[in-house]
Image (cartoon, grey):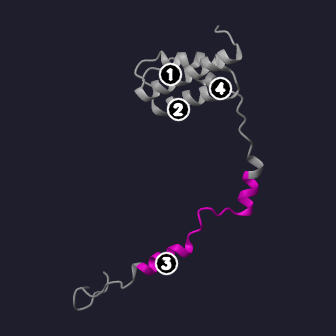
Amino acid sequence: MDEEDDNGGLFNIEVNSEDERAADEREKKVPRDFQSEEDFQKQLKEWKPKVETGDLYKTLTLPISHPSKPVSQTILHAIEELYFYRRFEEARRVTVGALSAEGLIVEFRKTLEGYLEVSLLSMAFRGIQLM
């Protein structure tokens, strides 16, 4: 059994400041932006750039009923990517497909309608016929 004094261990307490413990922990922590040279070289060898080719829309199966926020963001990114690559007809088709879904949030629907209008205007400006 542990040794106890005459007071039943009442005064057998550890006297240590929390500030001292916190200071010790801070000294032991490595800055979160620290990376050793070895780790950096390993990451450098494994790193490859992400190449966007305008094919994000191919990962979608439209229409998607009641899309979650991440799925909605993917739909928007796919349309924006097609617009960036000036593939307006494909952007229009993806937008129409997304608009045909049920349960769209009002703000998301308004954004899609705006994208559709921009796609149609861009196509008209460039003389592209609807297919």
Does 128 lie within the magenta span?
Answer: no
The residue carrying pointer 4 sits among few (fewer than 14), some (14 to 19) or many (20 or more) residues within 10 Å by Cα, namely: many
Q: Earlier in the sequence, mark 3 or mark 1?
A: 3
Residue 118 on image: x %, y %: 59, 23
Classify residue 80 by image quadrant: top right
Amino acid, disc 4: Tyr
Task: Indicate yes or no whether the magenta region holds residue 31.
Answer: yes
Q: Nearer the viewer, mark 2 or mark 3?
A: 2
The quarter in which the C terminus is drawn is: top right
Callout 1: SS: helix
Residue 28 x, y percent position in the rendering: 56, 73
Which segment did they paint magenta? 19-43
In the picture of the structure, the residue carrying the numbered disc 4 is 83
Q: Give x and y (percent) for residue 91.
A: 62, 20
Q: CA distance from mark 3 to mark 1?
A: 56 Å
Residue at the extreme front of the image, as rendered: 125
Residue bearing mark 2:
73
Q: Which mark is residue 23?
A: 3
Q: Amino acid at mark 3?
A: Ala
Q: Alpha-carbon distance for marks 2 and 3?
A: 44 Å
Residue 34 sits in quarter: bottom right
Mark 4–mark 3 distance (CA, rounded to whole Å): 54 Å
In the depicted structure, whether residue 78 falls above or below residue 131: below
Residue 68 appears in the figure: yes
Question: Which part of the image, by quadrant, shows the N terminus?
Answer: bottom left
Q: Secondary structure at mark 2?
A: helix
Point out the tag, 4 or 1, that comes first from the N-terminus. 4
Name of the residue lying farthest toward the bottom: 6
The residue carrying mark 1 is 113
Q: CA distance from mark 2 to mark 1?
A: 15 Å
Residue at point 61%, 23% (across, down) = 57
